[in-house]
Amino acid sequence: MIAEGALAVDTQRDRLGYVMGYEGPYVQLRPVAGGREWDADPARVRPATDEERLWSVRERTRALNSASSGGIL
């Protein structure tokens, strides 16, 4: 089981997200740049690698910069 708040990869969807919790048979993940959570099969979720964590920091920064500039990149 991956800890809440940890960065993880849903290998079924090839998506990176933060573990928000566990609900029934699913792990709930939230996209790195924010947005709606999705349910994933815990057997198909793995911890993010160092490279994926670095990518997530860049993606999160990009999203925050875009939001602060009114969406102008």
Image: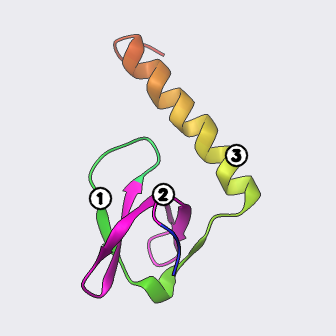
Main SS of the magenta part reads: strand
- Going by the numbered disc 1, the residue's amino acid type is Glu
- Provide the residue span drawn in magenta: 4-30
Q: Are marks 1 and 2 in contact (CB under 8 Å)?
A: no
- Give the number of the disc on residue 37: 1
Please state the horizontal and vertical placement of residue 68, each as a whole percent of the image. Answer: 40, 14
- Judging by the rendered image, the residue that carries numbered circle 2 is 5
- Give the number of the disc on residue 54: 3
Element type at mark 3: helix
Element type at mark 2: loop
Q: Residue placed at 46% from the left, 57% from the top? A: 18
Residue 65 lies in magenta, yes or no?
Answer: no
Q: Are marks 1 and 3 in contact (CB under 8 Å)?
A: no
Q: Residue placed at 30% from the left, 46% from the top? A: 35
Gap in Å between the C-alphas at discs 1 and 2? 13 Å
- Going by the numbered disc 2, the residue's amino acid type is Gly
Q: Choose the circle earlier in sequence order: 2 or 3.
A: 2
Asked whether, in this view, residue 61 is left or right of residue 39, the answer is right
Tally the marks: 3
Gap in Å between the C-alphas at discs 1 and 3? 21 Å
Asked whether, in this view, residue 73 is left or right of residue 53, the answer is left
User: Residue 57 versus residue 23: which sits nearer the camera?
Assistant: 23
Please state the horizontal and vertical placement of residue 41, each as a whole percent of the image. Answer: 39, 84
- Going by the numbered disc 3, the residue's amino acid type is Leu
Q: Quadrant of residue 48?
A: bottom right
